């Protein structure tokens, strides 16, 4: 039977990223991302709020991009997988932590780094992924290491295809944005 280990979160950074390099030169970046859930209580109708903190780890070029562009308070979209690590603390007790190993990242909010409640992705950068990075030999901002460049411009809009004759669902006016 197949299985899936996939996590998607949209939240705000709780502190600036911690970027470091392994002895072999691989980049590793750790961040903490807060997600908040709001609801009204059944008894009394008072607004309730619950914040959950997530440890997220970026590797390689994605780690370098996260270290450069993410800042405390900035909203971010992260896609990845869960990984639980085990180690022994100073007293010899087994300790566990569960982290999100990031595979894709999308910067959200405004370019000045202040995200506020603009979770709609008002133009704060672009998407970055480990897969696309590996295919190209670099990230969306680079060509395989070296200095960061501006992302490529968006392709020109395509002309809309000729309208089809209306049948059942085709004639429905739909405002869904996706």
Image (cartoon, rainbow, N blue to C red):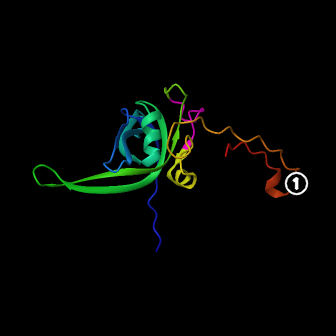
Up-down relation of residue 151 to residue 6 (above or below): above
Mark count: 1
Q: Which residues are magenta?
A: 117-127
**Which quadrant of the view contains residue 14?**
top left
Q: Foreground: 109 or 136?
A: 136
| Residue 121 seen in the figure | yes
Residue at image position (82%, 57%) is 168
Label 1: element kind: loop
The image position of residue 81, as x and y in percent, is 42, 55
Residue 125 lies in the magenta stretch: yes
The image position of residue 20, as x and y in percent, is 34, 41
Majority SS type along the magenta span: loop
The image position of residue 58, as x and y in percent, is 41, 46
Residue furthest left as drawn: 91
**Which quadrant of the view contains residue 118?**
top right
Residue at image position (53%, 50%) is 133
Residue 172 lies in the magenta stretch: no
Residue 17 placement, left or right of 89: right
Q: Residues within 10 Å of mark 1 (few under 14, many from 20)?
A: few
Residue at image position (78%, 45%) is 173
Q: Foreground: 141 or 173?
A: 141
Up-down relation of residue 55 to residue 93 (above or below): above
Q: Foreground: 120 or 128?
A: 128
- Residue at the disc numbered 1: 164
Residue 15 placement, left or right of 176: left
């Amino acid at each position: 039977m197949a299985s899936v280990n996939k996590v998607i979160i949209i939240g705000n950074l709780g502190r600036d990223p911690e970027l470091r390099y392994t002895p072999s030169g691989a980049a590793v970046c750790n961040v903490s991302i807060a997600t908040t859930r709001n609801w009204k209580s059944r008894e009394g109708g008072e607004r309730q709020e619950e914040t959950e903190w997530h440890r997220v780890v970026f590797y390689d070029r994605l780690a370098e991009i996260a270290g450069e562009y993410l800042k405390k308070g900035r909203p971010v979209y992260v896609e990845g997988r869960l990984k639980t690590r085990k180690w022994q603390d100073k007293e010899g007790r087994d300790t566990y932590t569960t982290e999100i190993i990031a595979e894709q990242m999308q910067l959200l909010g405004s370019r000045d780094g202040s995200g506020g409640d603009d979770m709609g992705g008002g133009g704060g950068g672009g998407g970055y992924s480990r897969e696309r990075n590996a295919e190209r030999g670099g990230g969306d901002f680079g060509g395989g290491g070296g200095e960061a460049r501006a992302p490529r411009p968006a392709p020109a809009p395509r002309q809309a295809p000729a309208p089809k004759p209306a049948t059942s669902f085709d004639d429905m006016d739909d405002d869904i944005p996706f």
